[in-house]
Structure formats: C-alpha cells, structure tokens
Image (tube, coloured by chain):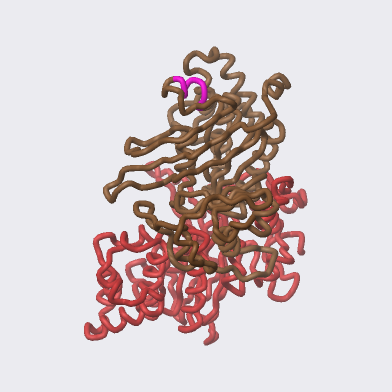
Amino acid sequence: MQDDLLLSIKDLRTWFELKRWGFLHAGFVRAVDGVSFQLGRGEAVTVVGESGSGKTTLVRTILGLVRLTGGDIVFDGRKMSGQKPEDLAWVRSHVGFVQQDPYGALAPFMNVRRILREPLVINNVDEAEHEKRIRDVLEEVRLIPADDFLSKFPHMLSGGQQQRLVIARAIILRPKLIVADEPVSMLDASVRVEILELMRKVQASHNLSVIYITHDLSSVRYFSERVFVMYAAKMVEKTEVNEVVHNPLHPYTQALLTAIPDPEPENADKFRDVPPGEPPNLINPPTGCRFHPRCPHMIKGLCDVEDPPEFEPTPGHFVQCWLYK
Amino acid sequence: MSDSRKGLRATQGAVLDTEDLYLYFRASSGVVRAVDNVSFKLNYGRSLAIVGESGCGKTSLARAILRVLPRNVDTYKGRVVVDGDDVMKFSEERFRQEVRWSKISMVTQAAMNSLNPVLKVGYQVAEPLLLDNRASKQEAMARAAETFGIVGIPEAFLERYAFELSGGMRQRAIIAMALIANPLIVILDEPTSALDTLTQANIMNALKKIKKDLQLTYIFITHDIATSSELADEVICMYAGQMVEHSKTDRFYREPLHPYARMLMASVPTLRVDKKPQFISGQPPSLVSPPQGCRFADRCPKRFDRCQEEPPLFTHGDGLVKCWLYERG
C-alpha cells in the first residue's frame, strides 16, 4: 500500500438481489460489476456514465451505504470489504457527500446553523469549536456575511446558495475525500460554472481527493485530470481528460463524444452518427462485451462471446475493448 | 407520410404571431409576472428555440400559447394569431376543438413518465383522434401505426404497455402523440432533458428528420444552450418574464446582442473549444416586484444611466434586442 493512495478499489462488485419467491432465487441486478481504480491524495477524478450505468451505486458503495458483493475497497489504508454498513461510520466521517438535488438534501425545518452543526454533533466535535467552524466554512463557500445566513432556512436560499451550503456541510468535518454526485445538474447554466469553480478551490485548499460523478462530458474538462467512463456496470475506459476528448478509444466513448453538441448554428442541419438502441438490462446483461449489440466495430465470435479484459494501448490509457488486443 | 398531408399546408407568412402577450399568476406573495409583454412572429416551417434559465417564463409562454392554464391566473391577455386566426377570440370549447392538438400540440417536460400504465400505448397515441369522433377506431389506429413509423417505433409496440418500453421509446411515443393530429406547430418543452446522452442524440435525429419530412414548425424550449442549437433556425432568449433577444441562430450562437445572452453563452462549457466558461453573478429579480428599468441592469457589466428606464425592443440587423445599447440601431 503506497502512502499517496487514498482509495484503492479492486474488482468491486455490488449486486442487488431480486425478490425471492420462496426458495426460488430470481437473480441479481449487477449494478457494479468488476470495477477497479485507484485514487491518489489530492486527486480529482470524474466518473462519466449514463443513468443506470452504476455510477451512483459505485459511490454509495464507497460511502459504505450499501454492502459490496465482492472485491476489495481499501480506504486510507483500511479495508472496507466484509464490514456491515453500520460498522462503516469511520469511512463516512472522512468522506463528504455532495448530493444532486440541494433542496432535497437539506432538511427544510433546520436553519443553516443547525444544518451545519448536525455533523459536528454526530461526530462528537468539541462544542466550543462549533460556532467557529460553522463560520469558517460559510466563509469558505462564500456565503457571506455569515450572520445573514446563519438563521435562514433552505427555502430562503437560491439554488446556487443551497448547493454552496451542501458543499459547506460536506467539508465541515475536514474529510479526506469528497464525493459529488451530479452536483450541478439541477442548477442553471450561469451558476454551474461558479459551483464547479468553488469545488475546485475547496479541493486545492484542503488537498482533498474528489470523485465527481456526472453524465455531462462537456463539463469534465473544467474539473478533473482523469476520467473514468462507465457503461452497463463496467468501467470501459480510464484516462486523462484530454485523451478522452481528442483520442477516445472505446466505441462507447466515441459515440458519447459524437452525441454531445457544442452550441453552434450548423447543428440544426447535421444528423449525428450515434448507435441506436439503449443500454442493456443489468439483470441479464449480454454475454461478452456489454456494448456489442450497439457497437459499430463488433467482431463476431469474439465481442459477443468473451468479456474483454482491460488493455493499455498507450501508457496510462486503459480500455476494455477487443479492438486494442 | 402521404403527400396529400403536406400539400394542405400554407407555406407563406406567419404560422404564429403573438402580440403583447401577458400571463400573470396569483400567488401568496403577490402577482407573479411570468410572461410580461412578449411579442414574436414565426413563419411556416421555421424552428424557434426559446432559451433562458429556470423561472424566466419559458414554459409559461408555451402554456399561454396553447392556453393550458392553471386556476390561479390573474391576467391573460394579448393577441395570438395561429394560421391566420386570432385564437384569443375563440371560446374555450372552440379553441379545444379547432386549435389545441389539431394546430398546436405539445410535448411536455418529462412526459414519458406520464403515460397511462393500464392502457396500451397505441391506444393512448391514437386517443386525440378518437375525441369528438374525429376518426373511427380503425382509422385512428392506422394513423397511430403510421405515426409510429415516423418517430421510429416498431409497429408491434402499438399493443404494448408503457412499462414494456424503454425511456427513449416512451419519449418517442409521446412525440407520436403530439404528431398524430397533424399539427402545424409542435411545442417541445425540454423533450430530452430526462434522457441519456446517446438516446438524446437519437431523438434529436428523429425530430430533425420529422421536421424535414412534415414541414413542421417547432417551438423548442430548453435551458440547455448546446442542445437548443440542434433544432433552431432562430432563438428567443428570455429573462425574468420578458423576451430580451430574438435573433437568427447564426448571430445568436456566435455573437448574441443582449449582454445577458452574451453572458449566458459564455457560461456554456464546450467540449471541443478550449475556453474558460464564465458565470453571471447575482440572481434574477423576483417576478412579483421586478425592478422598474431594465430587469438585467443589476447584473449587467454594461449598465449606464439609461438602464433605469425600461428599454423597448430595438431592431439591430435582422435581430430584435431589448437593450439601450442598441438605441441607435
């Protein structure tokens, strides 16, 4: 175990069992199926994937909210595998969570002071320190002057301010890792950039590691150095941001890039060359590569039979696709 | 798609002309001015994108045009001319029979989740034709099958239930529903925002093809600027209940006129071009008590004395802009 690694995940599987009929076992939803990656201290990565690709289950497993089915998670030198969710409180005190919908994530009956005090109380932080830490953290997320905000309730704040408060709550325990699940997808375009910049600033000033989950590939380059692309519970491509944008290897990543428009007047006359179909069912995923039914480069007899392992065609660029054998 | 349907359409002039349209709601905090004096003209076969941030009145504008109003309406006035008829003079019953769905239809936000779970999809799509005995059951189902072909759903799906369809297919069924009565205008309110990136691109392709084949007019409402460029010939940018700019796409996506539109464009992250997106500080004003002068003045970097007065719409080139900077053309 190297010291500069905060999180190391190996062959992680999180499966949810379907409802049993008596003794009959109906099967599993394989929400995360064989994911491996490592995250350094102070490093930010983005996990990109469509809805149902398993990205949220992945972070819920890392947060210790659902029990993993197989594989290993080592957080800060301690193993998480094999422990029950209730025994994983130590993980959650080191991980801050920024939710997608800020209004839904904030208790409507608590004012800002109570919302921020809650994690301090739960984690037995010395009472004398509370007020100072709350004010410091509000200062940091630019909800200033703090006195104006302390007694406000969430509905009195704008969407951007609510998301700042959620970020403040996530960092008040001085965590080592922040997990942000689509932190800007509910916000307006003009506010998004502001929140992403704030997260970058917080990350740099505390040397935090960040896992940023999104379905929007176009915001990735403003946020992290490395990108992981998920498709149907697998991590199909792992690489640097610039590589993903200029040299995507997996056919799924290539399709994603084709599908995303930049605002240009010519778009209205262009048809986009994207594969038809929809992501597979995770109860009975297709054999072989999970993208093969939609893939324009499918190799018959290989892609539809055998699951591709991870190849590394250029150093640091990993891809699960038989084209790079 | 038969030629007879195409031939019936007029192609000259404005299919939709709204003038001084107002829609105010009563709320506990006062009167909310959701749509505050909006006027625009749209010609046959053109697509219009309406962009703006949440709460700027985009959806309310669509509702005002289609006259789908909640109970707490305070003021609803103005002129709406559809295909040559001043429909604001129509009674509710006449509007329902002659305009809604037969001339203007709508795909609402997240509509794919509003399919009835206990009725077959084909029946739900055909339903608008069965109302008021517009068509016999067989004719309606045949039309539904034809429309399924247009939006790219296999015909066998007519007999399926909503839960058997994927998200993308359900959204296509909703689009089929909007097309079945052969309208002139289809209002698309965030038609793809709940869908995956690839599905979204597939649906956009389908919508582009439909527009070409059927010579439809789209009004495409979205907060996503990048997606709005996919379906637009012209763009209206709204801010705080008002239309601040109406431009052709060439202008709007390259160099919009209004300072707000310019900042909004600058806030869009781009995938291929390496530029740093900017943000707009501050918040839009309350629609209950909007400021006297220009509503964007508080956040505007180009503010000057004149902005204390409300600017009219100035013509600039082939665009319209509500900003004093363009007073001299």
What range of the chain is rendered magenta?
B94-100
Residue appearing at x 51%, y 73% in the figure: A197
Q: Position of residue A6 (x, y in %)?
A: 50, 80
Q: Is residue B213 above or below residue A284?
A: above
Q: Position of residue A159 (x, y in %)?
A: 40, 61
| Rendered-image quadrant of the C terminus of chain A | bottom right
Q: Position of residue A178 (x, y in %)?
A: 45, 73
Mark count: 0
Can the viewer see residue B228 in this picture?
A: no
Mostly what secondary structure, the magenta segment? Answer: helix
Q: Quadrant of residue B73?
A: top left
Residue appearing at x 68%, y 51% in the figure: B317
Q: Position of residue B30 (x, y in %)?
A: 29, 48
Can the viewer see residue B291 in this picture?
A: yes
Residue in the foreground of this view, choosing between A164 and B296: B296
- Drawn side of residue B249 relative to residue A145, left or right: right
Residue A319 magenta: no
Visual hue assigned to chain A: red
- Drawn side of residue B183 relative to residue A323, left or right: left
Visual hue assigned to chain B: brown
- Drawn side of residue A253 relative to residue B244, left or right: right
